[in-house]
């Protein structure tokens, strides 16, 4: 690696990037993982081992930060870890009280541990408050440009957002430029401790960012990212080291823990490949489900298996994530279910080797009709009659969940959640919506990916090829109430994910009447989404904490969007 212009060539430093899967709030368990990585790094003769953002507390800790004891435990654990750092230095992320006494009471901090003590503390400067992030709710930003001397190098310290520039952020969001300040202070390596959630297309964006910032600052970039699932967020790892010339020299694995040890003077090191986009989505969903279940104390899951593509994909992801023996499927045919649907569901269950129980709902459906028959009149009554079937199925899934201690999985996709083409307390029942951030057209892509991974059609072609239907009345198809999915998803990707107005979407060439109908469906279904199961986030804008629309509002309807 050539020295940047105007700077002397530095001696080699042995650096370890500790990419670990932390549990939010488990300070004791997280500290144990950090301790083990410090020991492994010391044994390998490493000069500096760096961990991800808020590694001691796990990210994001959210309102755990309101608990005073939680903050004190974070500080004490960090100080305890310092005692282990005698022959190796470590950078760990933690929460500490704001010592200034002014502003917000906490800081998102990084501690340099060396010689058995906390040698230096760096405070995150840029605090995001967009999408799923709400750090300005808790933290006071830092304003210093911190460089520390380690093994003959001037190491600049940055935490996650501190590395992001105006181009990557899509505009000027901050008055500070931490990387420019570190470059001005003479840093030759910048260590960025990050907790950057996965989303489709973000890997390429980050690679361009790292290269651009390395060349701009004339400093190498060491990026350490958290890995694992925490609630709706999935962190993909892929920690890396980029030369001052902007060249990728080393990269850790994706979607799994890794300790990447490298020599900063080497021209190349271990580089784990990045998978194709849909492979990464598939891996993210499996990791997200596996960690959500484990970190919430579940060892098994239950879901309704309809014979359709959505539930088939969720079942396949679950079987891969936690093992087929821990997946319990329930086929619940009604008078409107085709024989082929039950056959397809049972074939899928056999292919996946998961448990499958058949519970016909006819007797329960008839009982509701007997009691509420007069209610089911007119067009609204017809929809109510259809929803009764979905709610019977939801009750069955939840009953089996309660009886067996299984995590109930909702199987709806983003197209359905967007338009409200789903039933509260029915098919929306569950503790986690695995594919709730995938539009229907992407669901088909994911089915093909799952079959490619298996090397055979374990999701039967009959399930993939059949027209989508809820089978809640004779001859029903999704397209009876929704536009064709290619058109619908084109509108939804622009409106929900791209935040475009109705006028902008129409200007892109889509039919105005269809656009207005879809937009109205999205706006009217907000009350359903705010009662939905948490959705694993894989796009730039998922339903949940990253999209906070009011339920009772009149602006969008009155303004025309």
Image (tube, rainbow, N blue to C red):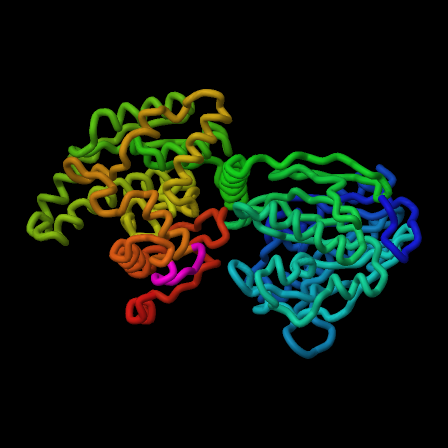
Q: Is residue 369 above or below residue 128?
A: above
Q: Is residue 346 above or below residue 473?
A: above
Nearest to the observer: residue 361 or residue 241: 241
Residue 221 seen = yes
Identified at 17% across, 50% down, the residue is 384
Identified at 86% across, 42% down, the residue is 265
Q: Is residue 533 above or below residue 406?
A: below
Q: Position of residue 135 (x, y in %)?
A: 59, 65
Nearest to the observer: residue 245 or residue 105: 245
Nearest to the observer: residue 311 or residue 172: 172
Q: Which residues are magenta?
A: 497-504
Give the total of numbered labels: 0
Q: Kindly indicate the quadrant of the structure image that contains residue 386.
A: top left
Identified at 61% across, 57% down, the residue is 168
Q: Position of residue 477 (x, y in %)?
A: 22, 39
Q: Kindly indicate the quadrant of the structure image that contains residue 554.
A: bottom left
Would you say 253 lies left or right of 501 here?
Answer: right
Would you say 50 lies left or right of 296 here?
Answer: right
Q: Quadrant of the N terminus?
A: top right
Would you say 11 lies left or right of 34 here?
Answer: right
Residue 92 seen = no
Q: Position of residue 488 (x, y in %)?
A: 32, 48
Is 299 magenta? The answer is: no
Q: Position of residue 340 (x, y in %)?
A: 24, 25
Is 499 magenta? The answer is: yes
Q: Quadrant of the C terminus?
A: bottom left
Q: Of all residues shown, which one is farthest toward the bottom?
A: 102
Q: Kindly indicate the quadrant of the structure image that contains residue 462.
A: top left
Identified at 71% across, 62% down, the residue is 109
């Amino acid at each position: 690696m050539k020295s940047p212009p105007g700077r002397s060539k530095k001696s080699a430093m042995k650096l370890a990037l500790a990419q670990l899967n932390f549990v939010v709030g488990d300070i004791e368990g997280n500290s144990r993982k950090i301790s083990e990585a410090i020991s492994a790094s010391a044994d390998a003769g490493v000069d500096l081992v760096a961990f991800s953002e808020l590694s001691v507390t796990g990210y994001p800790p959210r309102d755990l930060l309101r608990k005073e004891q939680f903050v004190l435990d974070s500080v004490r654990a960090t100080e305890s870890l310092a005692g282990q750092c005698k022959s190796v230095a470590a950078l760990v992320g933690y929460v500490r009280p704001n010592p200034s006494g002014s502003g917000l009471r906490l800081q998102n901090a990084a501690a340099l541990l060396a010689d058995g003590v906390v040698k230096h503390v760096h405070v995150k400067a840029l605090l995001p408050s967009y999408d799923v992030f709400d750090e300005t709710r808790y933290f006071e930003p830092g304003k210093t440009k911190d460089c520390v001397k380690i093994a003959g190098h001037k190491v600049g310290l940055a935490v996650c957002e501190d590395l992001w520039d105006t181009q990557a952020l899509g505009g000027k969001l901050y008055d500070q430029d931490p990387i420019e300040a570190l470059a001005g202070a003479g840093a030759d390596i910048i260590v960025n401790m990050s907790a950057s959630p996965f989303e489709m297309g973000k890997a390429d964006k980050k690679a361009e960012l790292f290269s651009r910032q390395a060349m701009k600052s004339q400093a190498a970039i060491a990026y350490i990212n958290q890995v694992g699932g925490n609630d709706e967020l999935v962190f993909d790892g892929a920690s890396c080291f980029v030369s001052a010339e902007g060249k990728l020299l080393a990269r850790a694995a994706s979607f799994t823990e890794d300790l990447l040890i490298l020599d900063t003077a080497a021209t190349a090191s271990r580089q784990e490949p990045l998978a194709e986009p849909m492979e990464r989505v598939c891996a993210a969903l499996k990791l997200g489900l596996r960690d959500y279940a484990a970190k919430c104390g579940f060892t098994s899951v239950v879901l309704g298996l309809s014979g359709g593509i959505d539930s088939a994909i969720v079942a396949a992801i679950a079987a891969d994530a936690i093992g087929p023996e821990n997946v319990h499927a329930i086929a619940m045919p009604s008078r409107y279910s085709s024989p082929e649907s039950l056959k397809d569901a049972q074939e899928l269950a056999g292919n996946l080797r998961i448990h499958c129980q058949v519970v016909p709902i006819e007797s329960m459906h008839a009982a509701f009709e007997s009691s509420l028959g007069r209610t089911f009149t007119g067009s609204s009554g017809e929809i109510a009659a259809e929803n009764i079937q979905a709610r019977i199925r939801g009750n069955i899934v939840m009953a089996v969940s309660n009886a067996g201690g299984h995590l109930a999985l909702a199987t709806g996709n983003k197209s359905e959640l967007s338009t409200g083409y789903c039933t509260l307390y029915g098919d929306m029942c569950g503790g986690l919506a695995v594919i709730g951030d995938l539009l229907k057209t992407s669901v088909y892509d994911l089915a093909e990916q799952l079959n490619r991974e298996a090397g055979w059609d374990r999701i039967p072609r009959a399930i993939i090829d059949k027209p989508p239907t809820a089978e809640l009345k004779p001859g029903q198809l999704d397209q009876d109430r929704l536009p064709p999915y290619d058109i619908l998803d084109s509108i939804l990707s622009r409106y929900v994910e791209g935040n475009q107005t109705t006028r902008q979407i129409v200007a892109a060439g889509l039919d105005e009447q269809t656009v207005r109908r879809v937009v109205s469906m999205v706006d009217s279904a907000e009350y359903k989404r705010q009662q939905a199961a948490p959705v694993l986030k894989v796009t730039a804008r998922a339903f949940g904490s990253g999209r906070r629309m009011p339920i009772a509002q009149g602006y969008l309807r009155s303004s025309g969007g």
